[in-house]
Amino acid sequence: MIVSIFRHPIFPASLGITLFLLCLVHPSCTASFERRDAWEGFNHGTLRVCVKIILSDEMPHETKPRSVNQAILEAAGARASLILTSHSRINHLDPEQSLSCRSAIPEILRSGVIRFHRCSGDICTAFVDYKADSCVSTAAP
């Protein structure tokens, strides 16, 4: 129980209060990307993909931020392409609809926007959104 920890003899009252306030303040100071936003798939014409990349030591330090974004978009594009291709083959009963969806993939991949990314050490996790309504809207009911 939190209250009993703060009343423990090794924790002075001021430390307990400080820890309690820190626990309350920390979530309000974090990024606006919340757990409910951490999903992958289709939603209202948007395809969101999650990727993890490992940063290489060969990236020059001064170009690392641009290189990280580029690496994220490349990895997300490969994943999005796979998801869209699978979606077009599984969810489109009509071969013309499937072909229409697959022909829209290059345009969809150019619409990628990094919604959130966080790097910890050499590993970055990112969520990238794509405007996929041209492919999703042609899906069979």
Image (cartoon, helix red, strand yellow):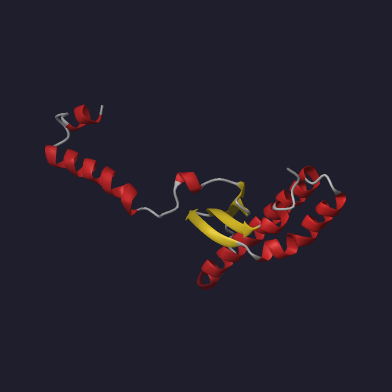
Quadrant showing the C terminus: top right
Q: Residue furthest bottom?
A: 62
What is the x, y in percent for residue 34? Answer: 44, 48
At a point 77% along the width and 49% down the height, the residue shown is 88
Quadrant showing the N terminus: top left
Displayed quadrant of residue 100: bottom right
Q: Is residue 62 left or right of residue 78?
A: left
Front residue of 22/98: it is 98
Q: Is residue 91 left or right of residue 63?
A: right
47 above or below 57? above
At a point 55% along the width and 45% down the height, the residue shown is 39
At a point 74% along the width and 52% down the height, the residue shown is 138
72 above or below 40? below
Q: How many marks?
A: 0
- Quick check: can you spot residue 105? yes
Front residue of 10/90: it is 90
Front residue of 39/55: it is 39
Q: Is residue 59 left or right of residue 82?
A: left
At a point 63% along the width and 58% down the height, the residue shown is 130
Q: Residue furthest right?
A: 95
Q: Is residue 130 left or right of residue 19?
A: right
What is the x, y in percent for residue 18? Answer: 19, 44
